[in-house]
DNA sequence: ATGAATGCAAAGGTTTTGCACCCCC
DNA sequence: GGGGGTGCAAAACCTTTGCATTCAT
């Protein structure tokens, strides 16, 4: 099992130090350009700037926050363009609506190579990513048994980290 | 593993015939009344009618659909009351925001005794419920290993049913 | 009689759309 | 110069709220 991208749980440092200051998708630009070209869409400075902000993030984000960021860095870029760009990036497969926060807000996240699930601490609100092969296996078996194929899934665990829990 | 509440997959009949025409929560009324009394809230015809419609369903629903249903059966009951009632029923523990449809709409569902996860067919859109003990076990182990407690989870699988897939 | 519930309409918030203008190809 | 992109504002939605009135207890 591996956990990454965040300290765990609730403040403890874990194994992700090396990755901490790297974007999740360093090579987004050629992928995006290729997608745009294939779809006969255009490479524009707005799209590039918004994408850059998104892929500089190391974590999940909500569109409203992104809009505020964009607005403060590039006052000329409006919310409509942000929404449009987010949708385009989703279609390009670079970004995905990954989960709902505990309060029900949609969070986006850069799609990286490997699949992971999420665990949200109900005390501190922190979102951790994890990958557990035995869960995946059990799941694939179940899907097969039920007669489904081509599955993907969203698996979010809402829990409390044990440290805070001891109070 | 058990699958219930629907034919599976995509039209095939499965094990849920006996349950098919029964509401998921036949005994909602005393529970609701008890909750209302405890909270010093009132039993009103509007709440009863809306609850009745909800618990007559055998499946998941979105608030917008419920509002349309209520509107057509009881034109005097407005959307605001529907929203308020849905929230009250959630607080009463009779109802819960259970998952997001593939299009991102929030679906509610009557809370019955036992936990289950969801699998949505990406072809026919049908939502199936299933419970798989080996997934649950793997999950509980993982949660423990990561140092979390008191977990609950939302696990939605998006897949294609094999029958349609053969076309 | 008291205070909660309702209906209505308005407000709040998020996301999409229409359109004139701009600019990349 | 054609067609997609952008910015702005308006529209479209969904959900919540305020308030006067009604109604359960």
Image (tube, coloured by chain):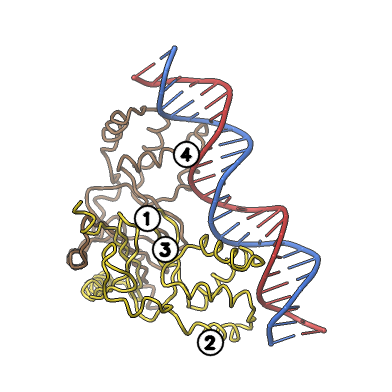
Chain colours: A brown, B yellow, C red, D blue
C-alpha span from label 2 to label 1:
34 Å
Q: Quadrant of residue A11?
A: bottom left
Q: Are discs 2 and 4 located on one and the same chain?
A: no
- Please name the residue shown 37% across and 68% down the image: A158
- Against A39, is B72 above or below? below
* Pointer 1 chain: B
Which residue is disc 2 drawn over?
B30
Q: Secondary structure at mark 4?
A: helix
**Mark 3, other Cα within 10 Å: few <14 / some 14–19 / many ≥20:** some
Identify the image quadrant of the N terminus of chain A: bottom left
Which residue is disc 1 drawn over?
B102
A138 sits left or right of B3 in the view: left
- The image's mark for residue A70 is 4
- Nearer the N terminus, badge 4 or badge 3? 4
Q: Nearer the viewer, residue A124 or B43?
A: B43
Determine whether label 4 and label 3 are within 8 Å by CB. Answer: no
Q: Secondary structure at mark 2?
A: helix
- The image's mark for residue A125 is 3
Identify the image quadrant of the C terminus of chain A: bottom left
């Amino acid at each position: 099992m591996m956990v990454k991208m965040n300290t765990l749980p609730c403040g403890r440092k874990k194994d992700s130090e090396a990755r901490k200051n790297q974007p999740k998708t360093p090579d987004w630009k050629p992928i995006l350009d290729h997608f745009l070209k294939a779809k006969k869409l255009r490479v524009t400075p707005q799209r590039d700037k918004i994408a850059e902000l998104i892929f500089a993030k190391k974590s999940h984000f909500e569109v409203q926050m992104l809009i505020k960021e964009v607005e403060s860095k590039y006052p000329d870029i409006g919310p409509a363009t942000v929404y449009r760009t987010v949708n385009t990036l989703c279609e390009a497969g670079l970004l995905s609506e990954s989960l709902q926060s505990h309060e029900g807000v949609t969070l986006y996240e850069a799609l990286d190579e490997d699949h992971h699930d999420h665990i949200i601490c109900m005390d501190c609100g922190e979102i951790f990513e994890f990958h557990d092969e035995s869960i995946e296996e059990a799941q694939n078996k179940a899907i097969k048994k039920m007669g489904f194929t081509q599955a993907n899934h969203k698996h979010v665990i809402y829990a409390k980290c044990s440290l805070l829990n001891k109070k």
